[in-house]
Amino acid sequence: MMPAAVPATFSPTELAAEAGRLLRVLLHVDCEPGRQWNYESCRRIAPLTLEINRLKREQDAVILTHSYVEPEIIYGVGDFKGDSYFLSQKARDSQAKKIVFAGVVFMAETAKILSPQATVVVPDRGSGCSLADSITGEGVRRLKALYPDAVVVCYINSTAEVKAESDVCVTSGNVYDIVAKLPERRILFVPDRLMADNVRVELKRRGVDKEIVSSDGTCIVHDQFDPAFIAEARTRFPGLKVVAHPECTAETAAAADFVGSTGAMMKYVKNTPAPYFLMLTECGLVGRLQAEAPEKNFIGGCRLCPYMKLNSLEKLHQAMVAPRPDQIVTLDEDLRRRAARSIERMFELTPKN
């Protein structure tokens, strides 16, 4: 948290009300080591959250926030918070003139694919993703040449050019159901090797016969968890529930009590009685749960995504006031249309709850 420095002047009453609003939601959320959310820390960022929210109204802008970014962004200025699938829906349905995406670059690209009429802005162009960066469109074309009979399924954690080379896009919440529905037996899955492993396990459990060929990308957050850590945690915390993301290894997923998307993990923890939870995912999700389910107890174990943490209130403010060319997401129209087909196919095949 850094002190705010914004041009607008707000009255003491406005600042006090904003600090109180922030404190009510951030009170139980862990802060940096040695610091905590209290009235003073909320008061320091109140001018910035008030100014960003004022700019949203003035610019007809909407801020989409992934669950992994800092809680002061999610609860201070975010209009919608959630996982990739939920936010892609909000981007598709948005009528705003500007979309500011607090997440990583591939998510902002997805917003531009689905809402081409909007100006899409990303606070930090360096907010990449080890999965999205692991394969290019040319890499997909080479794999397609090796497996011409395969249907190409891309995880949403991929670039626009990879989506443009794919037949259908998936998220961690719908990947099992969509792959099971596809008529083709051979699946070329990019870019997540570990998610492909988990899909093989789940489809075998369901009795679905598929051959899955994958590229070799992994998530630098989720590929670090291992079953030995889970076993040690269960010994120390009786009754512990372990919650994992399908970007983890198959061995880690098998040792967990629940495996699911960011949104599904949120729902599981909120609805499951347990004395302790171990979250094998990015720490931002723990922050959301601390804010929304403060009665739950979490033990250490989550990991930080360095890319997600490049987002900040200061960068959001700057990107809204005077965006640099690199912060504005632009896509070739032909590529955008081809990428949109794979995402729209995902919406068509996702089970309706």
Image: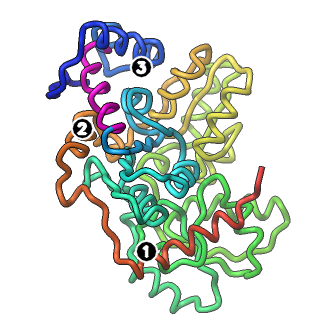
* Residue bearing the label numbered 2: 317
- The residue wearing badge 3 is 30
State the CA–CA distance, disc 2 to disc 3: 24 Å
Question: Mark 2 is on which residue type?
Answer: His
Question: With respect to residue 343, does 41 lie above or below?
Answer: above
The residue identified by callout 1 is 336
Residue 104 coordinates in the image, percent (x, y): 37, 51
Does residue 302 show up? Answer: yes
Given residues 58 and 212, the one toward you in this image is 58
Q: Does residue 294 lie above or below 280 as drawn?
A: above
User: Which residue is painted at 45% across and 65% down in the image?
Assistant: 158
Q: Amino acid at mark 1?
A: Arg
Q: What is the distance, in whole Å, between disc 1 and disc 3 at their CAs? A: 39 Å
Q: What is the spatial separation of the Cα atoms under label 2 and label 1, in whole angstroms?
A: 27 Å
Q: Which residues are magenta?
A: 42-57
Please tell me whether mark 1 or mark 3 is closer to you in this view. Answer: 1
Q: Is residue 50 magenta?
A: yes
